[in-house]
Image: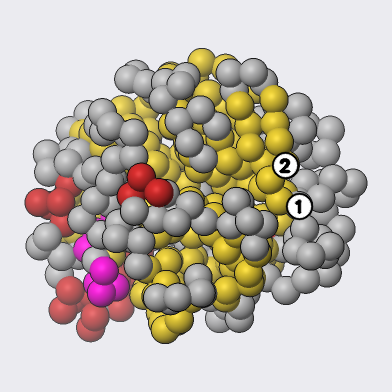
Amino acid sequence: MQLGMIHLDLLQLAANFSYAGHFSSLQPNNTVQLISYDNRFPALVGNASSNLTAQRDYQFVHEAGIYLPSTQSIYIASNYISLANPINVTVVDPPDYTVGAELRYPGLYMPNGGTAYNATHLLFCDFGNEVQPSSLTLVDPGTNTSTVLLSSFLGRNFSAINDVRVNYTAWGGDGSIWFTDDQYGALQGFRPPAEIPVQVYRFEPGTGKLQAVADGFAQPNGIELSPDLKTVYVTDSGYVLAPTDMNATRPSTIYAFDVAATGGGLVNRRVLAYSSHPFPDGIHVDRDGNIWSTYGHGIAVWDSQGVLMGEMRVDTVVDNFMFVPEGILLFAFTKLWLVVCDVRAKPLFGGGW
């Protein structure tokens, strides 16, 4: 389906409350709606179309979104239902992006965010449960085995490791792992009370060196590195602590940090953007350095200076997404949308991946 685009009048948006309210509440009906705030957005997405590639009656696509060359498949974590029915890993097969399988790997209890560790291994953030600690866990789909890479901060339990990125050596990085730790596991009732602040960490898997590099968040959620590996972006989704605990005065914010020239820390914390819709969660950066993040019913894109360029809006909640060779794959809880467009990620493995 070819997608139309709504072009907003920024002066009207700034001065006319009813105009702003109309577009803020706009909900498309079983399609993807493009909304432009900046004249660069139409050129960025090009002649876009959408395809609903899979649909279920439960939240089968929620977090992660990891492509592995060894299996030529994508791995997406479903949403939490209950301790008796924990999180699955939904396997999606390109190029038609249909569901191939729904799996549970041994030693992986509550997968959430994730990334490719290398061409053969998935790196998942495992929330854990009331017994199993939260951890960074490697999964080899080829052998159906898992290995815990990290499960404590010097003997103290993480609360609920949420999202993770690797500073890839293939891109000139140092191989370090960056991740967020929040309290959503305890807030959803399957993790014990937190015993450590919510923070962002940097881990060196080769040496075991582990640093807390940023704090002061309500709930640090998604994390991403810029294409040049010099900037780290973190979403704070403190606006929503639970379905019945939402507070518009809490953060719904994307922060940017510079990676320190030495020592591996973060410096120069600043607000990149405030999301007008609640719950910025998954975050990714395209090959041009534009920052894309979920924001409730869709995703939005800002340039590297924090100027809002546009949105892709749907009729269900979107907690994460990923770039694919054809464009963008939206994880809309019960729906999996493929948006064919001109947006691309910086490739890691070749072939657009």
- Where is residue 164 drawn, in percent x and y? 54, 52
Residue placed farthest to the front in the image? 207
The kind of residue on which mark 1 rests is Ser
Q: Amino acid at mark 2?
A: Val
Whether pointer 1 and pointer 2 mark residues with C-beta atoms closer than 8 Å, the reply is: yes
Viewer-nearest residue: 91 or 157: 157
Give above or below for 254 relative to 300.
Answer: below
Q: Position of residue 328 (x, y in %)?
A: 31, 39
- The kind of secondary structure element at disc 1 is loop
Residue projecting furthest to the right = 131
- Residue at (76% x, 52% y) in the render: 151
Q: Nearer the viewer, residue 224 or 308?
A: 224
Which disc is residue 92 wearing? none
Which residue is rendered at x = 15% and y = 70% of the image? Answer: 9
Left or right: 67 with respect to 191? left
Q: Residues within 10 Å of mark 1 (few under 14, many from 20)?
A: some
- Give the image quarter of residue 54: top left
Residue beneath the point at 51% across and 40% down: 117
Q: Position of residue 80 (x, y in %)?
A: 70, 41
Write the start and end of the magenta stretch as one range: 304-311
Residue shown at the point (60%, 65%) measured from the top left: 201
Q: Which residue is mark 1?
A: 151
Quadrant including the N terminus: top left
Q: Is residue 306 magenta?
A: yes
User: In this rendering, is residue 7 above or below 342?
Assistant: below
Residue 295 located within the stretch drawn in magenta: no
Could you say whether the residue bearing mark 2 is in a helix, strand or loop? strand
User: To which residue does mark 2 refer?
Assistant: 148
Res 30 → quadrant: top left
- Mark yes or no: residue 49 visible: yes
Q: Residue 142 at x, y = what percent? A: 58, 18
